[in-house]
């Protein structure tokens, strides 16, 4: 079993480049199913989740060629419309196949993703929207099946601004007859990236990035050529790495407009940030100041940065409150941070963090993607050695994180543990 071993205490310095965004690449790869022909997607990060999409597209019958960070996806021979449970359970974003397959082939059969470590994560809003567009939905042995002669544009109000729900319905609407209006839509930058690709394919998507998205469906769409946007969560993670070690790090590719809420809190914690043409430089404080956060859908503080920010607050000169309002169980990193000496009390959706002078390295276990990032960050600042196990969680969302951190002066390596 692989682990990541960190000897803490080095102040990071230098520059690091951000990879393509996982949460943009996944919907973009499924969007290739909307057209017949070869699409090209560049700047795709080399992550386990992207490997899973490659397998799924192959199961549908697409021909996928990967070279470096480029995917060539030829969908001319797509025939199957079933996403099997053994793949879907490893990556809930597989539900993004529902919209494109239903829109293009009139049918889809996708395993229900099931819950995951951070919450139940139902897809009821995805299905409500497809039903409003005329799809007949049935549940059969843990699979969702959709059928539709042809989807028809509809006005859909999303009870929650679901990110993949918005993406699924945008893709479905792109081939529906007539106009679709998505209200209370998610506003994440990844949605804007998907809209750009859909428009390149011949759809007419307006308002992406706002809470109301209007899509004129087309009778058919053409393959696209597109480059995935930079990963704002990876960028945020490296900014926190510079801050928590009191270092000075230039995160190349970080886009301030994608992280405003998080950057504001980083400044409140005493970090100095320089917004440059092609990135952001962070100057970490000797000791962070406490800064309370409440996670919320974009443009609020991103839930995907909550665990990483908590690691920073564990060392703050004072107490703060960290409230997780998007997912019901996204504090799995707390007990591991406590094993490193953090002083954190949880009451419902809110954790009270009392900063300590220093954390102590310890063997800790990753439980989900961002929790594992939080443990690595804590290890960078802790006294002594931290060994993070179950790092397959980390590999789902970070491309060569230990190499990138070592390049910034961290004493970090991937080791194969016995047993
Ligand atoms: C996306 O997940 C991201 N994943 C998540 O990133 C991210 O944490 C999340 O958005 C919130 O920003 C991808 O983009 C692949 P949601 P998603 O639907 O779309 C409830 C990471 O670390 N909900 O916006 O699954 C749901 O239970 C991952 O990279 C319903 O109730 O999130 C949750 O409480 C983790 N019914 C809330 O909405 C639905 O039909 C937000 O979920 C859909 C969602």
Image (cartoon, grey):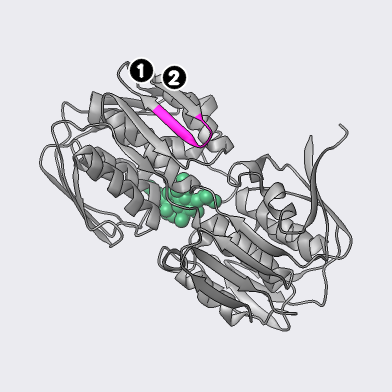
Q: Is residue 374 left or right of residue 226?
A: right
> Pointers 1 and 2 in contact (CB under 8 A)?
yes
Screen quadrant of the C terminus: top right
Screen quadrant of the N terminus: top right
For residue 316, which quarter of the picture?
Answer: bottom right
* Residue for point 50% across, 53% down: 231
Residue, disc 1: 80
Question: Helix, strand or loop at disc 1?
Answer: loop
Q: Is residue 343 left or right of residue 172?
A: right
Q: Is residue 366 magenta?
A: no
Q: Is residue 404 left or right of residue 389?
A: left
Residue 354: horizontal and vertical position, in percent?
73, 77
* Residue for point 26% across, 29% down: 35
Q: Is residue 347 left or right of residue 315?
A: left
Secondary structure mostly seen in magenta is strand
Name the N-terminal-most of marks 1 and 2.
2
Image: magenta residue range: 67-72
Q: 29 or 43: nearer the eye?
A: 43
Question: Helix, strand or loop at disc 2?
Answer: helix
Residue, disc 2: 59
Q: Residues within 10 Å of mark 2 (few under 14, many from 20)?
A: some
* Residue for point 24% across, 42% down: 200
Q: 260 or 362: nearer the eye?
A: 260
For residue 400, which quarter of the picture?
Answer: top right
Q: Is residue 69 magenta?
A: yes
Q: 136 or 376: nearer the eye?
A: 376
Q: Is residue 134 above or below residue 206?
A: above
Residue 137: horizontal and vertical position, in percent?
28, 32
Residue 209: horizontal and vertical position, in percent?
31, 60
């Amino acid at each position: 079993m692989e682990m990541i071993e960190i000897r803490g205490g080095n102040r990071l310095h230098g520059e690091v480049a951000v990879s393509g965004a996982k949460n943009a690449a996944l919907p973009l790869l499924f969007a290739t199913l909307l057209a017949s022909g070869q699409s090209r997607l560049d700047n795709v990060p080399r992550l386990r989740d992207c490997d899973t999409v490659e397998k799924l597209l192959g199961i549908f019958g697409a021909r996928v060629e990967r070279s470096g960070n480029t995917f060539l996806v030829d969908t001319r021979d797509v025939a199957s419309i079933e996403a099997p449970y053994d793949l879907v359970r490893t990556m809930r974003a597989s539900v993004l196949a529902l919209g494109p397959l239903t829109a293009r082939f009139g049918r889809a059969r996708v395993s229900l993703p099931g819950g995951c470590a951070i919450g139940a994560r139902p897809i009821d809003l995805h299905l409500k929207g497809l039903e409003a567009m005329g799809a007949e939905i049935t549940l059969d042995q843990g699979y969702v099946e959709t059928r539709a002669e042809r989807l028809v544009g509809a006005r859909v109000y999303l009870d929650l601004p679901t990110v993949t729900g918005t993406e699924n319905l945008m893709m479905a609407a792109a081939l529906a007859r007539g106009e679709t209006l998505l209200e209370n839509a998610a506003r994440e930058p990844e949605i804007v990236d998907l809209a750009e690709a859909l428009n390149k394919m011949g759809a007419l998507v307006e308002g992406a990035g706002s809470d109301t998205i209007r899509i004129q469906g087309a009778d058919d769409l053409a393959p696209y050529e597109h480059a995935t946007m930079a990963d704002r969560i990876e960028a945020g993670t490296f900014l926190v790495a510079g801050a928590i070690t009191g270092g000075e790090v230039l995160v190349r590719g970080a886009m301030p407009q994608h992280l405003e809420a998080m950057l504001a809190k980083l400044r409140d914690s005493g970090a100095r940030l320089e917004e440059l043409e092609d990135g952001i430089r962070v100057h970490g404080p000797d000791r962070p100041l406490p800064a309370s956060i409440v996670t919320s859908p974009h443009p609020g503080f991103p839930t995907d940065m909550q665990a990483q920010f908590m690691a920073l607050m564990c060392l703050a000169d004072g107490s703060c409150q960290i409230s997780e309002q998007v997912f019901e169980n996204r504090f799995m990193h707390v007990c591991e941070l406590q094993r490193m000496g953090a002083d954190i009390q949880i009451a419902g959706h809110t954790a009270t963090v009392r900063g300590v002078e220093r954390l102590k390295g310890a063997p800790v276990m990753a439980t989900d993607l961002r929790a594992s990032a939080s443990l690595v960050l804590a290890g960078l600042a802790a006294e002594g050695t931290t060994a993070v196990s179950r790092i397959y969680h980390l590999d789902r969302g970070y491309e060569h994180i230990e190499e990138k951190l070592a390049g910034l002066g961290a004493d970090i390596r991937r080791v194969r543990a016995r047993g």
